[in-house]
Image (cartoon, rainbow, N blue to C red):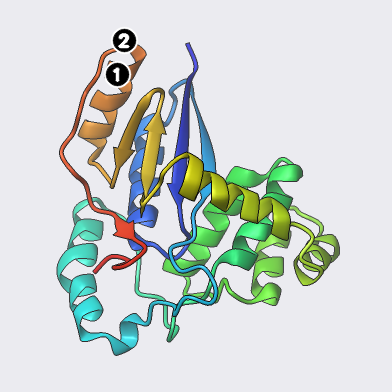
Amino acid sequence: MTLKMKVYSDYVCPFCFLGKKLLEETIKGKDIVVEWMPFELQPYPTPPVDPWNDPGKLEGWKTVILPYAKKWGIDMKLPPFSPHPYTHLAFEGFQYAKEHGKANEYNDRVFTAFFQEGQNIGEIDVLTKLASEIGLNAEEFKNALETRKYKDTHLATLRHAYEEANIHAVPTFVIGKQVVQGIRSKKVFEKIINQELKNETFNPSAGLACDMENHGP
C-alpha cells in the first residue's frame, strides 16, 4: 500500500528545513509518495523577517534552532541576508520544475541553497543557476520567472493552502488522513506513519513550527 503525504512549507522557514530532513530520513526505502505544497509565511508586501536585526530571533537561532539541528545531525546556518528574501519567485520556479517532473529535486536544491550555502533564493539569477544544476533548461526557466508565467498557478496553490486546507503554520504534514503541525522526531514520524497504514489515529503533541505572525524564533 502506497501512503500519500502532503507537506506544506516555506523555503525560509527553519523548522521546515529541519522537518524536511527528518521526514526524508524516516521514509527512506518506504512506499511513500510526498507532494510538497507551497506556503508563504510573508507574502509580498508583508514586511519580511529580518533576524539579523532582531535580537529575539537571533537568540532563538542560538537557543532553539541550532541545538535541535545539532541533536538531529542536520547541518544548517542562518542565511546572511537582511532581511530574508520573499519566496514567491522561488515557488513560481517550483511550479516550472513540477511541470517538468523535477519538483522534489528543485525543492531540495532551494532549501539546501538557502540554509546550508547561504544563497539568496529571492534572486532570479540564483534560482536559475539552481534550476540548471538539477537539469532544467536555464534559459526557459529564467524566462518563466521574468515573465511571471506561473504567477497565477502559484497564487492558486496559496489560496488552497490558506483557504481550503486551513494551513496556519508550517511545516504541516498531511499523512494519509492525519494532519500534523510542526516537526517531529524520526520516532514520532514512524509511529504516525505506521498508525496511518493501519488506519488508526495517533495524535502527537504540538511540534515546532513557523506561523505567519511570528515566523519562528
Name the residue nearer the viewer: 142 or 173.
173
Q: How many marks?
A: 2
- Picture coordinates of residue 183 (x, y %)? 28, 46
The residue type indicated by label 1 comes to Asn
Work out which residue is located at the far front of the displayed protein and give it: 163
Q: Tell me which residue sits at (41%, 43%) in the image.
A: 166
Q: Quarter of the image holding residue 75?
A: bottom left
Residue denoted by label 1: 194
Return the residue at label 2. Answer: 198
Where's residue 26, x and y in %? 34, 33
Q: Position of residue 187 (x, y in %)?
A: 21, 32
Mark 1 lies on a secondary structure that is: helix
Left or right, 93 with reference to 55: right
Q: Residues within 10 Å of mark 2 (few under 14, many from 20)?
A: few
- Residue 6: image location, x then y, percent: 47, 36
Q: At 29% from the left edge and 18% from the top edge, which residue is drawn? A: 194
> Can you see residue 172?
yes
Q: Can you say whether 27 is above or below 147 in the image?
A: above
Q: Secondary structure at mark 2?
A: loop
Spatial CA distance of label 1 from label 2 is 6 Å
Q: Looking at the image, which residue sits at the far bottom?
A: 53
Neighbours of disc 1 within 10 Å: few (<14), some (14-19), many (20+):
some
Q: Quadrant of the C terminus?
A: bottom left
In this picture, residue 73 sits left or right of residue 165 = left
Contact flag, marks 1 and 2 (Cβ < 8 Å)? yes
Side of 140 where 136 appears, left or right: left
Nearest to the observer: residue 210 or residue 34:
210
Q: Residue at x 32, y 67 (%)?
A: 213
- Inspect the image, locate mark 2, and give the three-letter code of the amino acid beneath it: Lys
Image height check: is 86 above or below 4?
A: below
Residue 75 visible: no
